[in-house]
Image: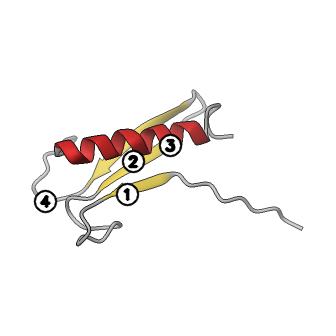
Amino acid sequence: MTKYLITPLVVSIHPEDKNPVFESGVTHVCIEDESGGAFVVLRQQGDYLKPGEIRLDFEELELIATAAADLRARYPEGLE
């Protein structure tokens, strides 16, 4: 029998009234690993963003730091 795991890799930071998956103004905090160790990736989408740009308010910044720390604690050795 195949053993399945639950592996949270993405946390959404969003206003209460926004869809956490696809709306503008939502920040995704992701953990990724390209065989060199785990690292944090921030993603946003929106027509107002320039390529490579991320816009955060100060409240979001604190939540992103907390989410990144939580993900790091889950995977201290990276994704295996």
* Residue on which disc 3 sits: 70
- The foreground one among 36 and 29 is 29
Badge 2 local density, few (<14 within 10 Å), some, or many (20+)? many
Mark 2 or mark 4, which is nearer to you? 2
The amino acid pointed to by label 2 is: Val
The residue sitting at 24% across, 63% down in the picture is 15
* Inter-mark Cα distance, 2 to 4: 19 Å
Using a 10 Å C-alpha cutoff, classify the residue at mark 3 as few (fewer than 14 neighbours), some (14 to 19) or many (20 or more).
few
Residue depicted at 57% across the width and 29% down the height? 37
Whether residue 55 can be seen here: no
Identify the residue position indicated by label 2 in the image. 29
Alpha-carbon span between mark 3 and mark 1? 13 Å
Query: Compared to 76, does 26 lie above or below?
Result: below
In which quadrant of the rendered view does residue 8 lie? bottom right
**Residue 57: where, in percent of width, then height?**
16, 46
Q: Earlier in the sequence, mark 2 or mark 3?
A: 2
Q: Nearer the viewer, mark 3 or mark 1?
A: 3
Q: How is the image coloured?
A: secondary structure
Q: Do the residues bearing badges 2 and 1 touch, measured as CB atoms within 8 Å?
A: yes
- The three-letter amino acid code for the residue at tag 1 is Ser
Mark carried by residue 47: 4
The foreground one among 70 and 37 is: 70
Q: Which badge, 2 or 4, is on the more N-terminal residue?
A: 2
Mark with earlier residue (2, 1): 1
Residue 74 in the image, given as x and y percentages of width and height: 60, 42
Element marked by disc 4: loop
Q: What residue is at 26 percent from the left and 68 percent from the top?
A: 16
Q: Nearer the viewer, residue 37 or 72?
A: 72
Q: Which residue, as the protein is rendered here, is positioned at the far right? A: 1
Residue type of the residue flagged with mark 4: Asp
Location of the C terminus by quadrant is top right
Can you identify the residue that label 1 sits on?
A: 12
